[in-house]
Amino acid sequence: MHSSHSALAGAALLTLGGCAAAGLPNAPLHPKAEAQAAPAALAPFAGDGPVTDFEHWQQRRAPLLRQTFAQGIYGAYPAPLPAHVLGREIIAAHAFGGLGSVEQWEIGLGEDRGAPRFRFHLALVLPSAAKGPVPLVLMQNFCGNAAALRKFKGISAPANGGCETGWFSRLMVTSIFGSRIQEPPFHQALRRGYGIAAFYAGEIVPDAPGPSTFAALEALTPAGTAPDQRTGAILAWAWAYSRAYEALISDSRFDGSRVALWGHSRNGKAALAAAAFDRRLPAVIALQPGTGGASLGRDDVGESIEEITKAYPHWFAPAYRAYAGHHEDLPMDQHQLIGLIAPRPVLIGGARRDVWSDPNGALLALRGADPVYQLSGAPPFQQVDPRQPEMDKPLAYYMRPGLHGVHQSDWDRVLDFLDTQWGAKAR
Ligand code: GCU
């Protein structure tokens, strides 16, 4: 496109984007007083009696809930496939003004006739000044690693559609979804002592409902699984977080006890499911994860089961679709998924004009998960101002102004949360 045309189109788009933003309603700052998550997290459930201690929660209730979430929403959890680092490449030994270095790893999963069954790439940005094992933000990337590290040559490029890296496309994407939608603040993270490891899980299961996606999902579904519980892409990407974590902790430069899964929107759904299904994963940051993530699903606020299963049939078990129009029949809800992460830290970020992702539903889910956290010894979650997360609690929440997307202010909160949780040991 001719550059003056591009600039014009960009200006038009900014104006249109601004109008659209102005026209979208704000979510109320507080959920309705009577609204609450059900069933109560510690109440009897599917033949299991009331939960009175955390041991009971972990030994009996948690496996039952994982099975219930797999059967009704996410599909079967894939069988473990060992992760092997197939190659490590130094992309830049000195980058970000000397603050860090960039590496790219190729990871292979499992083996079939001498070749890995799946492959994906991890891009790693590491602080140069690290004095001990480095804490990490492990993120899944909607627009892939090449968009996140566009100034570096040789970064593998797979990404979702609509993620071209040309300046015009970046202008469009960042004007609508925020300055940090593609690129995390590497300088800031490095200065504060964090490394960032990023991958695009669409390399394992593509993010489009076509034949190659369903073939990958079938291949990941454990043998003997009922067809309506075929693994969904959200749980496959969740499983991919665990595989990336295993590859990373095989390297002694990283601190396996300080790895925070980070995901925005669909990737936030995957990050929550990952920690719920894998007790080793230390912390979760989920921004605007919405339906199938942190927001309650047994109400009719935000994106419905009908809408999400129609637009993204590959994300969930086919069984989930049966609840379209019957959300109140779901036997469980997302507060129980968050309860599965207890006692590990979880930060949920919402946006006031992102009513589609139902920020208040996420607050209700955190409140609903709170009894489980308290049982694990955590102080109560009693946040009064939805705009100010209580960083020193393991459950934290905020709602910022604006639309669906990732802004610098989101990252400021993410890094403050991790500093507080990990005693600023990262500095
Ligand atoms: C769509 C989808 C959401 C999802 C979002 C995203 O809006 O309906 O469920 O969270 O995409 O991933 O950005």
Image: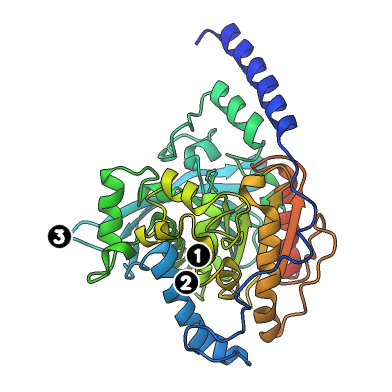
Counting residues from the N terminus, which is met first, the one under dot 3 or under dot 1?
3
- Lateral position of residue 215 relative to residue 323, left or right: left
Viewport quadrant of the C terminus: bottom right
x, y percent for residue 318: 35, 58
Instruction: Give me the C-alpha separation between circle 3 and circle 1.
Output: 31 Å
Residue found 42% across the figure and 63% down from its top: 74
Query: Disc 2 residue type?
Result: Phe
x, y percent for residue 159: 43, 39
- Judging from the image, what secondary structure is the residue with disc 3 in? loop
Disc assigned to residue 113: 3
Counting residues from the N terminus, which is met first, the one under dot 3 or under dot 2?
3
Is 288 drawn above or below residue 38 in the view shown? above
Is 99 drawn above or below residue 277 in the view shown? above
x, y percent for residue 372: 65, 80
Residue count near mark 3 (Cα–Cα under 10 Å), binned few <14, some 14–19, many ≥20: few
Residue position for label 2: 277
Query: Disc 3 residue type?
Result: Arg
Frontmost residue, 230 versus 102? 230
x, y percent for residue 345: 66, 70
Q: Kindly give the residue lying farthest to the right in the view shown.
A: 385
**Mark 2 sits near ligand 1, with its Cβ under 8 Å away:** no
Residue position for label 1: 273
Pointers 3 and 1 in contact (CB under 8 A)?
Answer: no
Residue count near mark 1 (Cα–Cα under 10 Å), binned few <14, some 14–19, many ≥20: many
Foreground tag (3 vs 2): 2
Instruction: Give me the C-alpha separation between circle 3 and circle 2.
Output: 29 Å
Q: Is residue 332 visible?
A: yes
Corner quadrant of residue 385: bottom right
Foreground tag (3 vs 1): 1
Pointers 2 and 1 in contact (CB under 8 A)?
Answer: yes
- Judging from the image, what secondary structure is the residue with disc 2 in? helix
Q: Is residue 149 visible?
A: no
